[in-house]
Amino acid sequence: MANVEILLVGGPADGDSVVVELDPSGRPPLTFYQQGGDGLADATVYEIETVTEPEGWIYRWRGQVPA
């Protein structure tokens, strides 16, 4: 499988990027969880969006993981 680097937009990691593995149909995971100091209890959620620039996708910040 191929990997792709995707930009994080909004939230505490705005401007950072992550490398994710594409699925068999060439798409990245629908969500990305950035773990905080307390693991998933302190994680933030990013959701994939299709964009024309840069490179087809971004992960947009959606907030904290619901408790």
Image (cartoon, helix red, strand yellow):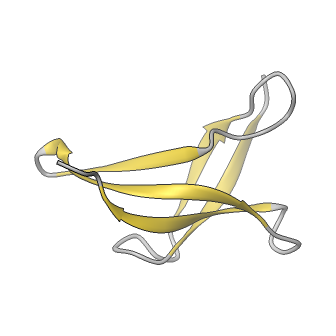
Q: Is residue 36 above or below residue 23?
A: below
Decide which of 50, 2 is in the foreground and name it: 50
- The number of numbered discs placed on residues in the rendered structure image is 0
Decide which of 3, 12 is in the foreground and name it: 12
Residue 1 locus on image (x, y percent): 78, 22
| Residue situated furthest front in the rendering | 66
Q: Please tell me in which quadrant of the rendered image residue 55 appears.
A: bottom right
| Residue situated furthest left in the rendering | 38
Q: Please tell me in which quadrant of the rendered image residue 62 appears.
A: bottom left
Q: Is residue 7 above or below residue 45?
A: below
Q: Is residue 32 left or right of residue 37?
A: right
* Residue displayed at 74% across by 33% down: 22
Q: Is residue 24 left or right of residue 20?
A: right
* Residue displayed at 40% across by 55% down: 45
Q: Is residue 18 above or below residue 16?
A: above
Residue 27 locus on image (x, y percent): 79, 38
Q: Is residue 45 above or below residue 7?
A: above
Residue 48 locus on image (x, y percent): 64, 55
* Residue displayed at 46% across by 76% down: 14
* Residue displayed at 52% across by 76% down: 15
Decide which of 45, 1 is in the foreground and name it: 45
Residue 3 locus on image (x, y percent): 72, 36
